[in-house]
Image (cartoon, helix red, strand yellow):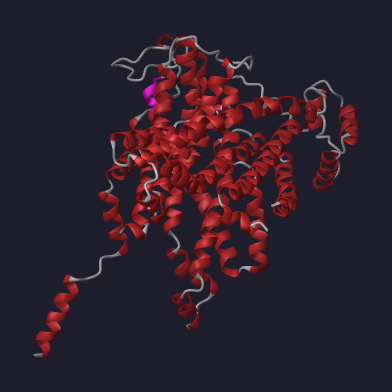
Amino acid sequence: MWKFIVKRLVSMIPVLLGVTLVIYLIMSMAPGDPAKVILGEQATPEQIAALRDELHLNDPVLVQYARYIGGLLTGTMGKSYNSGLECGIEIMARFPNTVRLASVSVVLSVVLALPLGVIAAVKQNTIFDGASMVFALIGISMPVFWLGMLLILFFSLRLGWFPSSGSEGLKSLVLPAVTLGFQHMASIARVTRSSMLEVIRADYIRTARAKGVSENKVITKHALKNALIPTVTVIGLQIGGMLGGSVMTESVFAWPGIGRLMVQSINKRDIPMVLGCVIMFSVSFSIINLIVDVLYGFIDPRIKSQYK
Amino acid sequence: MSENKKTNINELSTKYKKRSQTADIFRRLCRNKTAVIGGIVVIILLLMAIFADVLHDYEGEVIKQDVTQRLQSPSAEHWFGTDEMGRDLFARVCYGAKYSLLIGFCAAVVSIAIGLVLGALAGFYGGWIDMIIMRIMDVLLAIPGTLLAIAIMASLGASIGNLVIALSVSGIPGFARIVRSSVLTIKDSEYVEAARAIGATDRIIIFRHVLPNGMAPLIVQATLRIGSVILSAAGLSFLGLGVPAPHPEWGAILSNARSYIRDYSYIALFPGLAIMTTILCLNLLGDGLRDALDPKLK
């Protein structure tokens, strides 16, 4: 297992280098002179030229990129055009908030989606099955920011149960987590239902029933464990979408995470900060994918044996 | 006698003539009620988008501001009410279909076209071509799609053309992977070998023989992709990075509605419902197509 993890970590290096290069090249296409952005409208051409030299902006893009990567390896992401502070410090200060929101959303969506999918499969072609799948389809089709707005309208402005913004206390986490988790809950429930439907028709399930194993045990111990592989794959795939969704959710609820920082930085044309945020999201996404791959081994011993 | 036999064979061949595969798929699709409903709504939305300029006067109705009519509740005169600038929301939401569907279709077509060529080259030639193309695709896949689009829009600036570019780039790797895997399964089949034996060029083999036979998963993915592009475009416009004002894109209308949601919730209700209905129907159609194209479900 360890050998597999180390191998995957090593294979992540060229991908992450590629990711940083792509993002760096995209952001370097941004119009406008960074030196002018930092110094403001009143800056003289001499001051601008001096700052361009200091920031090595006259170097070719690939040289600038190599310098950026060198900085990343020593733990610096460059200085924010806006605050003048090291971008990494601000990103790391906001990162725990995004992790908190995303992890609560994942837990919430999995805890609700698994029973929903399992019950829909076990009670196939009943009203419950139909209702849960309509619910799932609506969830998939609903824009995350619109759901956030509707939840604010009803649960915050009309009923006053939860705050509409901020990150103080557990109450403020409820609406953003539900917003971010709802779409993913719908996808996970759909996949769980279809993989459960395949599994519960398998011979070993019939055998377990014939042996007199209780229905609960058949479903939870024999069927669900075997139906989990596609579900875990979808959870892993959904996390990429969730990171994108967190940008919208954090903006709707003024949640102080990296997503909101990124949107604020875009509006202020703070390119180093946007670059740092996208790289942070992409690195997190790659690490989550690695965790999902390792998780497969714990669920399915056949996959674990391939890791050796 | 021989003449009679010939007539009988002709009659039999007409009677048992094999139905075309497309007709078969269409028949199976029509049997799926939810897919039919989804398809009908998508067609209605398409017609709304195509005839948007005929149905609504852009200058005089969709973007014309009238402060005397601002924030009017839904009524017989203004079915969906009016927004903070006094513009008719019904006209804006209907006209918004043009922007959302146009962006959705264009971005999906560009992603498919580029993904198709890259996937076909990688799958057909293999070796270093495959290695280079697929490693680039791996890198693009390692960046969450919405974030890649946000980064591109942050760099290029908000405009409809840039939005199509941003959403197309994030869709390419998915299509390239699908086409590559289809090509890998088809390229060693007997009819490809036969085409090669009669001297067909690689271009003809790829575009005439290999790709048409690997289209099924691509069609399904394309339908679902249009939905996800519309959703992402609305999200980007909501953040102020998509379609610039005063164009009535659904996400942009919702973004403006944010400040008025407490007292005028209907402003946020209708554009949101329009997005949800469109995505829902595209998903229903996509699911139906997947079932209709699946030979196991024949």
Write down the region rendered in magenta.
B88-93
The quadrant in which the C terminus of chain B is found is bottom left
Q: Would residue B187 appear left or right of A124 to someone viewing this image?
A: right
Measured along the vertical axis of the image, is residue A270 above or below residue B128? above
User: Do we see residue A235 in this rendering?
Assistant: yes
Residue A154 spot, x, y in % from top left: 45, 15
Name the residue located 51 percent from the left edge and 34 percent from the top edge.
A110
Measured along the vertical axis of the image, is residue B259 above or below residue A70? above
Q: Residue furthest front?
A: A212
Measured along the vertical axis of the image, is residue B21 above or below residue A260? below
Q: Nearer the viewer, residue B13 or A233?
A: A233
Tally of numbered discs: 0
Residue B20 spot, x, y in % from top left: 29, 65
Residue A23 spot, x, y in % from top left: 70, 42
Q: Quadrant of residue A132?
A: top left
* The stretch drawn in magenta includes residue A18: no
Name the residue located 43 percent from the left edge and 14 percent from the top edge.
B66
